Amino acid sequence: MKFKDKVVVITGATSGIGEACAFAFGSEGAKVVITGRNAVKLEQTAALLRAKQIPVLSILANASSEEDNKRMAEQTLAHLGTIDILVNNAGISMRALFEEVDLEVFKQVMDTNFWGTVYATKYCLPAILASKGSIIGISSINGYRGTPARTAYTASKYAMNGFFESLRTEVMKRGVHVLVVAPGFTASNIRNIALTADGKSQGESPRDESKMMTSAEVANYILKATSKRKRDLVLTTQGKLAVFLNKWIPGILDGIVYKQMAKEKDSPFQ
């Protein structure tokens, strides 16, 4: 029970990897703080955690709001006195050609994925410096390799990776651990609610979710990597291969990625 009584803040924890992380850390004795922008879903997740005897504090917060992130950190410290681990999980995706996408959609993705991470980290950092704790960023293989029709999502994840690489070197001599996680394709609702060119939700995943790693599996890998204070975590064979090939043969991978993504159901390009 290495995480017993540790305070773990998880943004966007009402579904997918965020919710799975709440159960994973909570099952190891942590006190869990979860955020979400949907009050009903937030309370449903909190109730499920309490049913497992996991101490939980739920805070209604929109990841893209600086004020909400500031309030999240303040409320956590007021109720629990410290922050040991921050899991920057809140995120949204998109699927549309750049030439067709409304720039407000692009901005919305950046505001949630990148700026939401910056805001949460900024306001939790003083407490994490004091506790010599961990900052975790749920990035993506898209933070290493861009894919067509996901320009905003790719940009947000590259920005996250650069931000954490820089921050890591700032705090590495002060006892703070920074972990960047690239899950690869994971069964969650992120593709169902991905934004289309005009900002509407996609509705149906264009990929076979049944063949993907589950959110619970990803959460367990994150738990172990945090325990070992690892620097990076790249998951799935496909994900590791994409990172490797993009480093050594990026030009060839351009063609491979194009062909693979063009096979998706209702692909916006052929």
Image: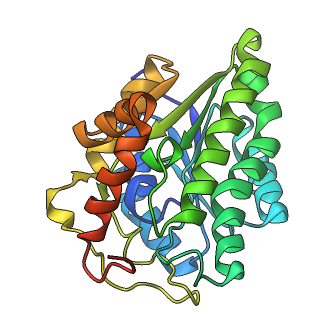
Residue 207 spot, x, y in % from top left: 24, 69
User: Residue at left 53%, top 34%?
Assistant: 180
Q: Nearer the viewer, residue 69 or 84?
A: 69
Which color scheme did the rendering employ for the protein?
Answer: rainbow
User: Residue at left 38%, top 33%?
Assistant: 249
Q: Nearer the viewer, residue 7 or 261?
A: 261
In screen coordinates, is 58 left or right of 207?
Answer: right
Marker count (numbered): 0
Quadrant (top left/top right/bottom left/bottom right) for the C terminus? bottom left
Quadrant (top left/top right/bottom left/bottom right) for the N terminus? top left
Residue 63 spot, x, y in % from top left: 68, 63
Q: Residue furthest top?
A: 173
Q: Is residue 14 above or below residue 251?
A: below
Q: Is residue 127 above or below residue 218?
A: above
Residue 199 spot, x, y in % from top left: 58, 86
Residue 234 spot, x, y in % from top left: 38, 34
Q: Is residue 120 above or below residue 58?
A: above
User: Residue at left 75%, top 37%?
Assistant: 81
Residue 28 in view, yes or no: no
Q: Nearer the viewer, residue 82 or 222?
A: 222
Q: Nearer the viewer, residue 52 or 214?
A: 214
Residue 137 appears in which quarter of the rendering? top right
User: Residue at left 50%, top 83%?
Assistant: 196
Residue 186 appears in which quarter of the rendering? bottom left
Residue 198 in view, yes or no: yes
